[in-house]
Image (tube, helix red, strand yellow):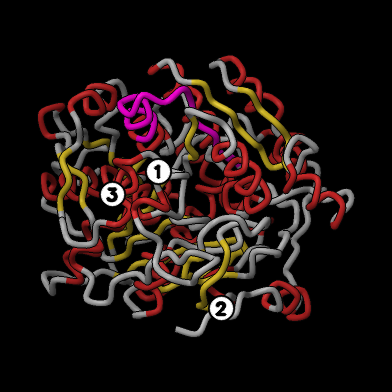
Amino acid sequence: MEKNIPYKTYLEESEMPKQWYNVRADMKNKPAPLLNPATLKPMTAEELGVVFCDELVQQELNTTDAYIDIPEEIRDFYKMYRPSPLVRAYCLEKALGTPAKIYYKFEGNNTSGSHKLNSAIAQAYYAKKQGLKGVTTETGAGQWGTALSMACAYFGLDCKVFMVKVSYEQKPFRREVMRTYGASVTPSPSETTNVGRKILAEHPGTTGSLGCAISEAVEVAVSSEGYRYVLGSVLNQVLLHQSVIGLESKAAFDKLGVKPDIIIGCAGGGSNLGGLISPFMGEKLRGEADYRIIAVEPASCPSFTRGKYAYDFCDTGMVCPLAKMYTLGSGFIPSANHAGGLRYHGMSSTLSQLYDDKLMEAVSVEQTKVFEAAQQFARIEGILPAPESSHAIRVAIDEALKCKETGEEKTILFGLTGTGYFDMVAYQKFNDGEMSDYIPTDDDLAKGFAGLPKVDL
């Protein structure tokens, strides 16, 4: 072990961030605004307030304040599991024989098992503060639904979750954790909503998508008095809350006197990636430092690497605002891969703008290669990673092996978003040799692109 560099670096409780960082404040090219699908005009706070909590609407629209105070009640909850550790992967470095230094920020050390709790508790707090009865949401693999059910139980709110059908069936224990915390969980698409019935009629036997589940959750929220809809990724407000990941990571590196060269995060809708990179990207935007930032997505749902940068519906039912993002089309139904949290058809508007400005790069990886990396990491580092997190592990290993070839001593940081103990069906498929890779053809993608709305601004 290197002198003075510990395996794990913990910040003191007093060093935990007291403010979230809003990267949009430092962006020269701001993310394009959400549009009203009926008028194609930017959504107003009043219009968004029908769907979202009032304070969250203000955070969603704020592009000027670099730092926003974290309420004391939320910081008190964070103290149950934060600050989370920055871990030096010495064993992995040794096994790879690489001169690279590999670090990961571990977000799986809370009962929900993932980083999603950072935003769930914030959104539940604002819903409670507004005097609401409850909230509705969607979930893919179940990490967000689990985190939100915990947060709602803490504040005494009702929680209605629409879970993508394939994940509902693949991950029954994740579903039961949500129910244990008091949430109702419905497989999506379902017969309980108008949009769900419409989707089922048009796509009989569909395994569902996050876009479908969002449509159902929004329909229930706007038709139920005292409810609002909350989202676990994509939105600016979520990336804001998740900035605690990056802020803690940067503070820990500063404490060690170390600077990462490469920062890697898995990318589905953008919550983990945006949260991890935000303060580093802020330095890059201000010209204070430079970093190579890599987004990793599934080859089966390649929003960044094969999508189009265009205005699109955020949901399959086309009831939500239009967002300008890298998208595969709201009608795109991804294959039933085992990284359910990375199956969204689009990407955060903030991250999409940064990617379009070439401030970050993106790669896609096949499912079997991801699970090879997950198994290798589990055996060497002793943590069973979530399939989503393992996309970042795959590319971190690949970059470390490139350093082995070149002899470069790069410092690599990746986000370990959570644990995979509720993903054992996926690991069983991999271990039994039954897991396959699916990469959509150009014709498959063309069908999704054909449904993009015509927006001429």
Task: Pick the residue in front: 176 or 28.
Answer: 28
Query: What whole-number distance in Å separates the C-alpha atoms at marks 2 and 1?
Result: 40 Å
Q: Up-down: is 304 above or below 208?
A: below
The residue that appears at 44% across and 56% down in the rendered structure is 270
The residue that appears at 77% across and 42% down in the rendered structure is 429
Asked if residue 321 lies in the magenta stretch, the reply is no
Q: Up-down: is 121 above or below 312?
A: above
Circle 3 sits on which residue? Answer: 59
User: Closer to the observer: label 3 or label 1?
Assistant: 3
Name the element at disc 3. Answer: helix
Circle 1 sits on which residue? Answer: 91
**Horizontal and vertical percent position of residue 391:** 53, 55
Extreme residue in the bottom direction: 456
| The N terminus - image quarter | top left
**Horizontal and vertical percent position of residue 355:** 39, 74
Query: What's the mark number on residue 308?
Result: 2
Bounds of the magenta span?
123-139
| The C terminus - image quarter | bottom left
Query: Picture quarter containing residue 42?
Result: bottom left
Q: Earlier in the sequence, mark 2 or mark 1?
A: 1
Amino acid type at image mark 1: Cys
Query: What whole-number distance in Å separates the C-alpha atoms at marks 3 and 1?
Result: 41 Å
Q: Up-down: is 121 above or below 251?
A: above
Q: Is residue 216 left or right of residue 34?
A: right
The residue that appears at 27% across and 29% down in the rendered structure is 82
Amino acid type at image mark 3: Gln
Q: Earlier in the sequence, mark 2 or mark 3?
A: 3
Q: Is residue 102 visible?
A: no
